[in-house]
């Protein structure tokens, strides 16, 4: 099942562009880490996820848009689920987020942990060549799909902390941590938070604005003036409320 999701993402995001940095309104790099299949109520009990929220902004009213996993991934990149209701193999055409990024010369890349030719984040950090849009997918153990949120965070905490202080990775970078969907039998509320130098958090470090996965492309579009894909991203709420505006 996850293999097909990887194929969906790799079809859109494999490879990347090399070029100069395009300055954004709020941030110059957007790094998304995605985890799997965990209810918000369970995720927020994890000490590291709670810490990340306290360091930046915790979105307390953020929802996935569908079940199972695949339509949520598709929604983040295409601004629509295209009525996909399973984890099957689909040939999706039409404008996507990468098309909008490329139209402005903005660099991008998907990193898939343990996936051949797609797991070179450390090399890119070392060579100062991390692109401006990063989509990072851990393996099925480290994303909580086959394990648990506590297992996933026991991997993610040392992984992220070892890299987030590197200026080749963190300079004017907005880090976004999110889950694709909730577990079964819930409202599909999921954990999401932002950290990084562009964040100007409120005193309580939480934002109760209604966001969902369409807010991801909406935020990126707003930051770089990309326009939109003409789907649900066009009227989604961007999570720019607590971002610095230089």
Image (tube, helix red, strand yellow):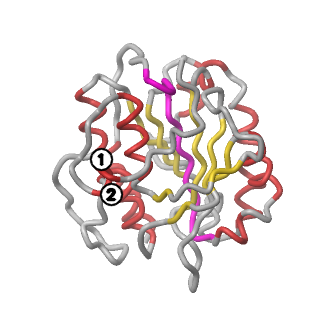
The total of numbered circles placed on residues is 2
Mark 1–mark 2 CB contact (< 8 Å)? yes
- Residue neighbourhood size for the residue with mark 2, other residues' Cα within 10 Å, grouped as few (<14), some (14–19), many (≥20): many
41 left or right of 112 in image:
right
Image coordinates for residue 224, horizontal then vertical, percent: 37, 28
Q: What's the residue at 72%, 26% (across, down)?
A: 165
In this figure, which residue is indicated by the disc labeled 1? Answer: 12
Quarter where residue 178 is shown: bottom right
Image coordinates for residue 208, horizontal then vertical, percent: 61, 56
| Label drawn at residue 79 | none
Which residue is nearer to you in this view: 228 or 111? 228
Residue 102 colored magenta?
no
75 left or right of 118 in image:
left
Using the numbered discs, state the Cα–Cα distance from disc 1 to disc 2 in whole angstroms.
Answer: 7 Å
Image coordinates for residue 245, horizontal then vertical, percent: 53, 24
Image coordinates for residue 25, horizontal then vertical, percent: 45, 24
Magenta segment? 24-38
Residue 9's place in the image compared with 104, above or below, is: below
175 left or right of 80 in image:
right
In this figure, which residue is indicated by the disc labeled 2? Answer: 8
Residue 36 colored magenta?
yes
Look at the numbered disc 1 and give the secondary structure of its residue.
Answer: helix
Quarter of the image with the N terminus in it: bottom left
Q: What's the residue at 52%, 51% (across, down)?
A: 137
- Residue neighbourhood size for the residue with mark 1, other residues' Cα within 10 Å, grouped as few (<14), some (14–19), many (≥20): some
Q: What's the residue at 64%, 65% (across, down)?
A: 144
């Amino acid at each position: 099942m996850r293999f097909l999701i990887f194929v969906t993402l790799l079809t859109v995001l494999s490879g990347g562009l090399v070029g100069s940095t395009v300055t954004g309104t709020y941030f110059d790099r957007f790094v998304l880490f995605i985890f799997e299949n965990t209810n918000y109520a369970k995720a927020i009990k994890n000490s590291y996820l709670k810490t990340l929220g306290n360091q930046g902004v915790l979105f307390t009213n953020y929802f996935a848009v569908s079940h199972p996993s695949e339509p949520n991934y598709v929604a983040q990149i295409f601004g629509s689920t295209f009525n996909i209701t399973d984890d099957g193999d689909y040939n999706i055409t039409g404008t996507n987020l990468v098309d909008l990024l490329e139209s402005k010369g903005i660099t991008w890349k998907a990193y898939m942990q343990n996936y051949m030719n797609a797991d070179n984040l450390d090399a890119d950090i070392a060579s100062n060549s991390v692109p401006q849009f990063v989509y990072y997918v851990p393996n099925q153990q480290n994303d909580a799909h086959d394990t648990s949120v506590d297992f996933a965070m026991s991997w993610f905490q040392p992984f992220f902390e070892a890299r987030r202080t590197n200026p080749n990775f963190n300079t004017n970078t907005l880090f976004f941590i999110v889950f694709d969907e909730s577990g079964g039998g819930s409202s599909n509320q999921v954990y999401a938070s932002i950290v990084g130098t562009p964040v100007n958090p409120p005193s309580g470090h939480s934002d109760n604005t209604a966001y969902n996965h369409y807010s991801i492309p909406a935020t990126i579009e707003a930051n770089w003036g990309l326009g939109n894909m003409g789907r649900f991203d066009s009227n989604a709420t961007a999570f720019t409320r607590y971002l610095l505006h230089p």
